[in-house]
Structures are given as C-alpha cells and as structure tokens.
Amino acid sequence: MSQIPQFLVDNLFTTSATTSRPHITLTWAQSLDSKIAGPGGQRVILSGPESMLMTHWMRSMHDAILIGVNTLILDNPRLQANLLPPSLNLPPPQPLILDPKLRFPITSRILNEWNTKPDQRGKTMRQPWIICGENVPTERVREVEGAGARVVLVKLDDRAHIPPSSLPSILTSLGLRSVMIEGGSRILSTFLHCPKRDDGSKLVNSVVVTVAPMFIGEGIGVVPEGEDVGLPALKTVHTEKMGKDAVMICAVE
Ligand SMILES: NC(=O)C1=CN([C@@H]2O[C@H](COP(=O)(O)OP(=O)(O)OC[C@H]3O[C@@H](n4cnc5c(N)ncnc54)[C@H](OP(=O)(O)O)[C@@H]3O)[C@@H](O)[C@H]2O)C=CC1
Ligand SMILES: Nc1nc(O)c(N)c(N[C@@H]2O[C@H](COP(=O)(O)O)[C@@H](O)[C@H]2O)n1
C-alpha cells in the first residue's frame, strides 16, 4: 500500500475541512468482544499489518492526532506516521494530549523523540502539545514547557475534563483543520456521548473502527463499564477488509 487507500479518500473528506470548521474523526481498534486493551490497560496489538498501515495513512490525512493522558502513560506512543514511505515527505500530524491536570510525564517517548532528534522536527514529527486546565499551577506549566512540550491552557467543565464540545474551537485557535481522536476508552466515551459542538452542529464527523478477529476477555472496553447507554446511532458508510481485519467507516446519525 504505497498510497492512501482510496476508500479513505472517498469517505473521510478531511481535505474539505477548514480551521473554522475542523473535521473530527473518532477511531479505534477493537476485539470481537469490544475491548481495546488488556487487563490494567495493557496495550494489545489488535491491528494486523494492513490495517495498522491504514491507520498511519489516516494519521497523515489529519492535521492532528489526539489521545487522552492515560493512553500516553500506558502506551507511551510516538503518534507519528512512521509506517509510510519517507520518500513521500508527508507533513507529520500534530500530536495533542488531553490532560486536564497536566500529569504528562516529561520522560515520555514522544517528548524524548522530539528532544533527541532535532533533525526530524517538522519532517517526521512535531512538538507534542498538551491541552490542560487553566487552573494548573504556573510552575508545573513551566516545568513541562521547559522540558520541550507546548502547553495549551483551556477552560474545564464541571467534571474537570476538557469539554468535547469545545474541541472544535480549540482546534480553530491552534490553526488545525482536522483531528483524529485515537482514544482511549474514556476519551472515546465522552466524545460519543457529546452530540454537539458549542455552535450546535454535529461534533463527530466520522467514526473509523478496526475490528480484529480475536477475543481479549478481561480488559478495557471501547467505553468504560456502565457508559454503554446513551451512545449515538451510527450509520455504516463503508466497510473494507484489510488483511485479517474489517474496517468500518461510520457516520454519527
Ligand atoms: N486499541 C486502540 O485503538 C486504543 C487503545 N487504547 C487503550 O486505552 C487505554 C486508556 O484508556 P483510558 O484509561 O480510558 O484513558 P484515556 O486515554 O481515555 O485518558 C483518560 C483521561 O483523559 C483526561 N481527559 C481529558 N479530557 C477528557 C474528557 N473530555 N473525557 C474524559 N477524559 C478526559 C482525564 O485525565 P485526568 O484523569 O487527569 O483528569 C482522563 O482520565 C489504554 O489501555 C490504551 O492501550 C488507547 C487508544 C487506542
Ligand atoms: N490502530 C491501532 N491498532 C492497535 O492494535 C492499537 N493497539 C492501536 N493503538 C493506538 O496506537 C497508539 C500507538 O501508536 P504508535 O506506537 O505511536 O504508532 C496507541 O497509543 C493507541 O492510540 N491502534
């Protein structure tokens, strides 16, 4: 797969997005028993090589990739599109971490890569941007910025979370036209439960799910236990077999 899979081009419409109306894609890989990780949040490789590569193409189609701070802590990801051919010189996606209390570990791999590979900046990686509550102590903000990340202060909701409805305006203020939200469970749940943007329009534009033919058993569900009520209806837009996996592109109704 040396170019973007055509079914993504045909069904995601990220290129028509603008900074004033950013495109939001929610995506994850799950087992047949609807788990995204093992016991205690242990990372599980669900995607086969073909669907993992497809995920990296999707990363490169969006201006930004977003995860929750627990995923950053548990998986220690790089959030790059490093499976794509380097010769294509595709602009790397902007990593965003939703981290209300600024728990971001400055020893994380994503920051280490940024600090130790200056020649790769803007080529294969971008500086991690951490979105946190405006009540975080200034000394902590300085510590994280001093370690090399950018900290973006935003208003929190009454649960001390970054309100999903406000993400579009945060993206607009950061000059980003599209975001691919990769998880984890709590982030997926709050975005799925929040139908509208602050301006009243639909929050999530696309949902892309990789289903791997395996059972995890005990583990982390797509949404946390007890939060599987009140989820929106989805409409299948396209289904594609990728190696051993099935990939579904859906729209929120
Ligand atoms: N298979 C897959 O595709 C993927 C699997 N995963 C898995 O998901 C697991 C982690 O999921 P989970 O523990 O739920 O953590 P998340 O990654 O969803 O992070 C949750 C944290 O994000 C912060 N947060 C900020 N804004 C919000 C908001 N609006 N709603 C909810 N939380 C918000 C909170 O931090 P605070 O508590 O500090 O307030 C919260 O505890 C890992 O095991 C990882 O392996 C992750 C991504 C993809
Ligand atoms: N698409 C997909 N398939 C899986 O099997 C996964 N476990 C994940 N996890 C997500 O990818 C992140 C790690 O990616 P990198 O190491 O940075 O390439 C991880 O944090 C999850 O967001 N995704």
Image: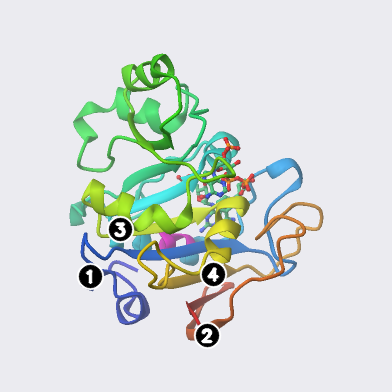
- Identified by mark 4, the residue type is Val
Is residue 60 found inside the magenta-colored segment of the image? Answer: no
- Residue 36 lies in quadrant: bottom right
Query: Label 2 neighbourhood size at 10 Å, few (<14), some (14-19), many (20+)?
Result: some
Secondary structure under the numbered disc 4 in the rendered image: strand
Q: Earlier in the sequence, mark 4 or mark 2?
A: 4
Instruction: Give the amino acid at mark 3.
Output: Ser
Magenta residue span? 52-56
Give x and y (percent) for residue 105.
50, 25
Element under disc 3: helix
Determine which residue is flagged by label 1: 15
Residue at 45% x, 68% y is 196
Of callouts 3 and 4, which one flags the residue occurring earlier in the amino acid sequence?
3
Q: Which mark is residue 60?
A: 3
Using a 10 Å C-alpha cutoff, classify the residue at mark 4 as few (fewer than 14 neighbours), some (14 to 19) or many (20 or more): some
Q: Nearer the viewer, residue 9 or 174?
A: 174
Instruction: Say what amino acid the circle numbered 1 marks.
Output: Thr
Could you say which quadrant of the image residue 46 lies in?
Answer: bottom right
Q: Which residue is mark 4?
A: 209
User: Where is residue 120 drawn, in percent x and y?
Assistant: 23, 35
Disc with the residue nearer the chain's start (1 vs 4): 1
Measure how far apart labels 1 and 2 are at the Cα level: 21 Å
Q: Residue 97 vs residue 14: left or right?
A: right
